[in-house]
Amino acid sequence: MKKILMFTYSIAAYAIGFSSILYWILSVSNLIPEIAIDQEPRVSLWLALLNNFFLIALFGIQHSVMARKWFKDWFAKYFLRPIERSTFVLVSGLLLFNLVYHWQPIGGIIWEVASNSLLYHILFFLFFAGWAILFISSFLINHFDLFGLRQTYLELMGKPYQPLEFRVIGFYKLVRHPIYFGMLLGMWATTTMSVTHLAFAIAVTAYIIIGTRLEEKDLTTEFGETYKAYKKGRGMLIPFLKGSKTKDTYVKRTNKKIKQVQ
């Protein structure tokens, strides 16, 4: 019964976490005006900035703290380890809903591309391409492990949990963090850049840069020289940042090391 409850909990957490991402995408796309972040300002500029800073800080701190190994070890002492990732997804989803819903518009337009122009269609293509890269990349590493379902499913089946292997496939051959790259592309490729959207994009970008550096420390600790070699072959957030002459060499070297460990 306990295992069934854990799996049910992880399904609910997944639904909330995944829905929050879709809500976020729709809010920054302006495809549904009622939930778009670009609304008329409702409070003073300074109050809006203070509110928005608090929202992004709350979301960023939660992500950074709950993703650290020391927190996961602490969680396992007092709660069931298989639901640790699901709990992270659940809290992240709730805070993302909170971030988008309570984000205060600032007003003002930085740029607005005419709907009958080529650039308009290019930006819309890049917008959807960014979010597609995010979701595809999550499946490349294991979407269901990332969202906590694999952990509770294995527990339900009575099988031990095995950490994911480090593999260099798909978009990961071009950039170290394609999920974050897709997120940034989706945020910045917009046909209408309002001051509200700009503030949102800057805040998310700052969080991603800080969070990615913390994550890379954990990955280096976990995978050692294998990850150090991988880092030299491509950029952290920007594809093709490293020379193409070294890219294939490091992909082959990294995958060779993984096979040797296995």
Image (tube, rainbow, N blue to C red):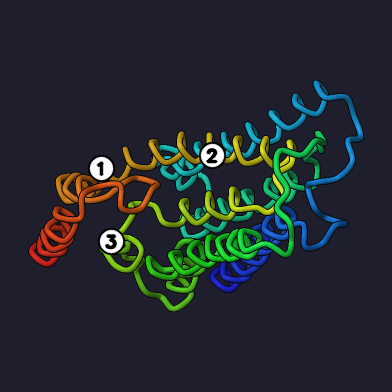
Numbered mark located on residue 173 in the image: 3
Crowd rating for badge 1 (residues with CA inside 10 Å; few <14, some 14–19, many 20+): some
The location of residue 196, given as percent across then percent down, is: 74, 38
For image coordinates 61% across by 69% down, the residue present is 11
The location of residue 204, given as percent across then percent down, is: 58, 40
Q: Secondary structure at mark 2?
A: helix
- Relative side of 131 to 70, left or right: right
Up the image or down, 241 lies above or below 129; here it is above
> Does the residue at mark 2 contact the one at mark 3 (Cβ under 8 Å)?
no
Quadrant of the snapshot with the N terminus: bottom right
**Residue designated by label 1:** 220
- Alpha-carbon span between mark 2 and mark 1: 22 Å
Q: Residue furthest front?
A: 117
The location of residue 205, given as percent across then percent down, is: 54, 39
Q: 71 or 195, which lies in front?
A: 195
- Callout 3, which amino acid? Lys
- Relative side of 258 to 6, left or right: left
Crowd rating for badge 2 (residues with CA inside 10 Å; few <14, some 14–19, many 20+): some
For image coordinates 12% across by 67% down, the residue present is 259
Q: Residue furthest bottom?
A: 157
**Foreground label between 2 and 1:** 2
**Foreground label between 3 and 1:** 3
Numbered mark located on residue 205 in the image: 2
Q: Secondary structure at mark 3?
A: helix
The location of residue 257, given as percent across then percent down, is: 11, 59
Q: Which quarter of the picture shows residue 53?
A: top right
Numbered mark located on residue 10 in the image: none
Q: Which quarter of the picture shows residue 248?
A: bottom left
